[in-house]
Amino acid sequence: MPARAAEDLAERLEAIPGARGPTLVLGGGALHRVLDARPALRERLAPVFTADPCAALGDIACDPERLPIAEAAFGVAVSPLLLHWCNDLPGALVQLRRALKPDGVFLGAAFGAETLRELRTVLLEAELEETGGASARIAPFGVVQDYAHLLQRAGFALPATDRELVTVRYRDPTRLFSDSRAMGETSALRERGKPLTRNILARALDLYAQRYAEADGRVRATFELIVMTGWAPAPTQPKPLRPGAAQSRLADALKTTERSAGEKAGQ
Amino acid sequence: MSDAIELDPKLLEVLVCPRSRTPLRYDREKQELISDAARLAYPIRDGVPILWEEEARELGAEE
């Protein structure tokens, strides 16, 4: 998934010729490998600095919610699969916007609410069966509309979000856990409630295999990838006109006669 | 630290102290980034500035 998200972001950056470095990458790793395969894009985005919570993954180690970045320092900000970790996503987005020069572009990928819906369902059911109660096992992810709204609230111009559902097929459900762990994506919830017992887990894996197996015995897992795009505001950007500022009449463009709202058609 | 990795001056230009949001001063000898405004020194490990407040050292009166 991280490679897929990075690939997606790089393709979008290739399609935005105005995107020029310096570039801030929030959340290290996958994007660098993707850029290595795209020397022209890498050159356009250079210099590329990576900020990550973990020192081993970045050029700077920092809290993504307290970016140690000067204002208007970057032409591009990219965040592959880190933002769904933030407790204060609106705050993190505002800081990214501030780090951008006017007309600088932000591209971010995050997991959406549909992510791991199969696992959520079976864990919930298994826990209910075993204990008569349930606790949150997978951190909640935002839905696509939330992210769109947040971009706007963070002051980005021309905000856009879109989503893609990606189905990954695993040989058996336990692979999904080892894969999540390899991505560093095990649950970030602080209050996880009662520990997951062996019985619940075994029951959940059974349910998973029963319900989501395909003809060849592999099981599927859904990931929802949300990609956000927004620009730091600049006077040169297209803006909606004031109401009543139109220079030509809609009726002329449609080659029809304008009627006031009170008149009935055909009279 | 004689084998210290030199910090990229372009990187230093864009960094600020996460607490005070003011520019940082590079101490090559100690391999630290100093925030005079917040009176904090952030460590640089293997060439990577660690700009977590929790990791910073408070500056002494003489520094």
Image (cartoon, coloured by chain):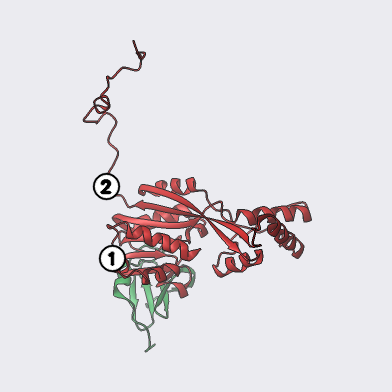
Query: Of callouts 2 and 1, which one flags the residue occurring earlier in the amino acid sequence?
Result: 1
Question: Which one is in front, A40 or B55?
Answer: A40
Q: Nearer the viewer, residue A198 or A208?
A: A208
Indicate the chain on which mark 1 is placed.
Answer: A
Task: From the top left corner, tell me how far across and down residue A32 is, in percent.
Answer: 40, 70
Of the 4 image quadrants, the one containing the C terminus of chain A is: top left
Above or below: residue B1 compared with residue A68: below
Q: Name the residue under label 1.
A: A44
Residue located 59% across and 56% down the image: A116
State the separation of the CA atoms marked 2 and 1.
Answer: 21 Å
Which disc, if any, is residue A234?
A: none
Is residue A22 rendered to the left or right of residue A189? Answer: left
Q: Name the residue beneath numbered marker 2.
A: A237
Q: Which of A3 and B45 is in front in this view?
A: A3
| Residue A161 drawn above or below residue B45 | above
Which of the 4 quarters of the picture holds residue A73? Answer: bottom left
Same subunit under labels 2 and 1? yes
Q: Which residue is drawn at 37% across and 74% down?
A: B33
SS class of the residue under badge 1?
helix
Give, as a three-letter code, the residue at label 2.
Gln
Display colour for chain A: red
Q: Which of A77 and A9 is in front in this view?
A: A9
- Residue lying at the far bottom in this picture: please name it: B2
Q: Position of residue B47 (x, y in %)?
A: 39, 79
Chain coloured green in this rendering: B
